[in-house]
Image (tube, rainbow, N blue to C red):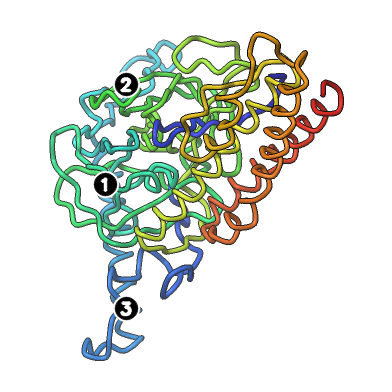
Amino acid sequence: MGQVSRRIVLATLGSCILFVICVLGQGTIPQGEGEYLDPFTVPDSQPNASDGKSLAQLYLEKRIRELEYELKLARSELARITSTEVSQPTEPASSAATLPARSVQPSEIPQGALVVVSGPKGSGSGFVAEMKGRTFFVTNIHVLGAARGAELNTIDGQRLNLGQGAFLSQNRDVAIVPIEWSGPVMKLSTSLNYDEVAIGDSITVMGNSSGAGVATKLSGEIRGIGATELEVSAEFVPGNSGSPIIHDELGTVVAIASYLKDFSSDSKWTEDTDFDAIRRFGFRLDGTIEWERVSMSELHRQAEAYHLFEHRTSMIWNISYMLLHESKLITSYRDDDSIGHLYTNISTDFNWGRGTGSAHNTQLLKRFIQSLVSEAQNDIVDTRKQLSISFYQRQFNEIVEFRDQSRAKLKQFERSRL
């Protein structure tokens, strides 16, 4: 369908195929739905008067948690450095052998922190990580949004129970949910710049490829580093959304697998493609991130509203494209709950043997196209009103233009062929 750049979210959640910390979460987040609070200091339930704590007490408790976490990181780094130190060479430096860079082994990756998301709408991935003294389940917003009724289990078979609220990045496809957890956790790189992460470094994507429910290990390297994203060569596929991207030498999570960019006319998920056809990206978890807190129920409601709009947009686009460029009418959508009603007269009265050579057929097709043009417009305003989460607002704005293009194609077909 032409060289259109399409951003493809990597979960099999929904009908369309469509994260280290230098100052992680330094932005603020809200006291209630849609406000902005710090997810690393705000309790799961807000303190009330009976708590008897002053603001000074709450602030000092926050600083103690932060300092305890920084001390834990320092001890861990000291232990790592101590364990990898080698004695001074007895030979001249010029003849000393060069030590190979340390590479994390699969057995060193805490696979018990890897989470598989399985639900009626598909599957995805996530992981458990400690951030500034708190433990979170980390995944993509698009995975969590489509996970109503889903089960979350670690590769070791441990069940994760999420609370009623989540924190969503305003500008990245990243969601974190505070959890009570005593099992293994993934280590996050505190800063890509400080850790000297560079293009060409080897990485591993651990996840639930194609929703198979088992841990998979995909190797690759960093191809590009942006302010909020990394591009990698590891060929992750559906089910890998939310998977940790682990730096092999550091053994830490440097990003979260998030989406593909498809510049080809045909998306093939599991086959090798040219570099300029499909490219793979993950969102970084360092830098300043502004978080918005939402309830799970509101997240699911908005996700469902967006996915219905996306689904309808996909069908309307496909119909308009095939009519204008292939002179073919897609009939497989006649059983779809959202636009199937438009096919009523076409299905019963259209003479397929005569096509547009029949005046009756032409009239039926005109009515179908006019109805589809109206259908492409009538849910835009309503859907926009339903979306207040930044991620879904951005996604909506990216695809709404395809509605305009679809209407233009339908009108062009009507003018030129009918």
In this picture, is 280 found above or below 273?
below
| Marker disc for residue 60 | 3
Q: Real-space Cα distance between discs 1 and 3?
A: 39 Å
The image shows residue 120 at horizontal and vertical percentages of: 29, 37
- Where's residue 194, x and y in %? 49, 44
Residue 235 percent location from the top left of the image: 45, 19
Q: How many numbered marks, from 0 up?
A: 3
What residue is disc 2 on?
A: 217
Work out which residue is located at the far right of the displayed protein and give it. 416
Residue type at the position of mark 1: Gly
For marks 1 and 3, give the one nearer the viewer. 1
- Considering the numbered disc 2 on the image, is that residue within a helix, a strand or a loop? strand
Q: Nearer the viewer, mark 3 or mark 2?
A: 2
Separation of marks 1 and 2 at Cα, in angstroms: 27 Å
Q: Of discs 1 and 2, which sits in the foreground? A: 1
Q: Earlier in the sequence, mark 1 or mark 3?
A: 3
The residue depicted at 31 percent of the width and 48 percent of the height is 148
Instruction: Kindly identify the residue that appears in the image at 39 percent across and 53 percent down.
Output: 300
- At 47% from the left edge and 62% from the top edge, which residue is drawn? 292
For marks 1 and 2 on the same chain, the one whose residue lies earlier in the sequence: 1
